Amino acid sequence: MLLEISAAFPGTPLLIVTDSWFGNDGLLKPMRKTVGQHCHMLSRLRVNTTLFALPPEHQKHQLGRSRKYGDKMGNATTLANKFHERATTYSVNLYGKQRDVLALTTS
């Protein structure tokens, strides 16, 4: 269904909003392979999900294969605690109820 929507609006950025079940590369990687880099995903992360920075670029005469992951940044809980003070509370309709959520906008 997502591929059909993307085909109907070629070149338009596609934002997929999912729950934590799809928070890994099981959905995003195949979508990006088919649709391209204008496909983005917003997902609720599991608290024990380890996050990594982007890997360094492959050097010209580098031995071995390129790194799959960059440096370890921590898990979702430790990163959330790190930025908690800078977050803003927003009231949103989530799962059929009005809820307060914390979000941080970076520029």
Image (tube, rainbow, N blue to C red):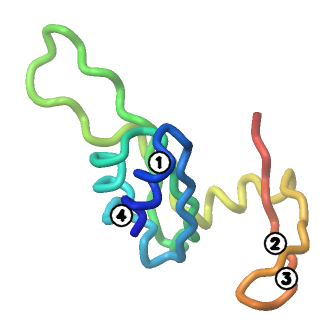
Q: Is residue 62 left or right of residue 107?
A: left
Tell me whether the residue at label 4 lies in contact with that at label 2, contact meaning CB atoms closer than 8 angstroms.
Answer: no
Label 3 or label 1, whichever comes before in sequence order: 1
Q: Quadrant of residue 91?
A: bottom right
Tell me whether the residue at label 3 lies in contact with that at label 1, contact meaning CB atoms closer than 8 angstroms.
Answer: no
Nearest to the observer: residue 55 or residue 100:
100
Disc 4 from disc 2: Cα separation: 25 Å
- Tag 2, which secondary structure? strand
Q: Which residue is mark 3?
A: 99
**Residue 7 spot, x, y in % from top left:** 40, 51
* 4 vs 1, front mark: 1
Residue at the bottom extreme of this rendering: 96
Identify the mark at residue 101; answer none if there is no mark. Answer: 2
Q: Quadrant of the C terminus?
A: top right
Q: Residues within 10 Å of mark 3 (few under 14, many from 20)?
A: few
- Tag 1, which secondary structure? strand
Inspect the image, locate mark 2, and give the three-letter code of the amino acid beneath it: Val
Up the image or down, 90 lies above or below 40; here it is below
Identify the mark at residue 39; answer none if there is no mark. Answer: 1
Label 2 or label 1, whichever comes before in sequence order: 1
Nearest to the observer: residue 49 or residue 36:
36
- Tag 4, which secondary structure? helix
Q: Which residue is mark 4?
A: 27
The structure residue drawn at horizontal position 71% and vertical position 87%, both measured from the top left corner, is 95
Up the image or down, 1 lies above or below 78; here it is below
**Residue 19 spot, x, y in % from top left:** 53, 76
Label 3 or label 4, whichever comes before in sequence order: 4
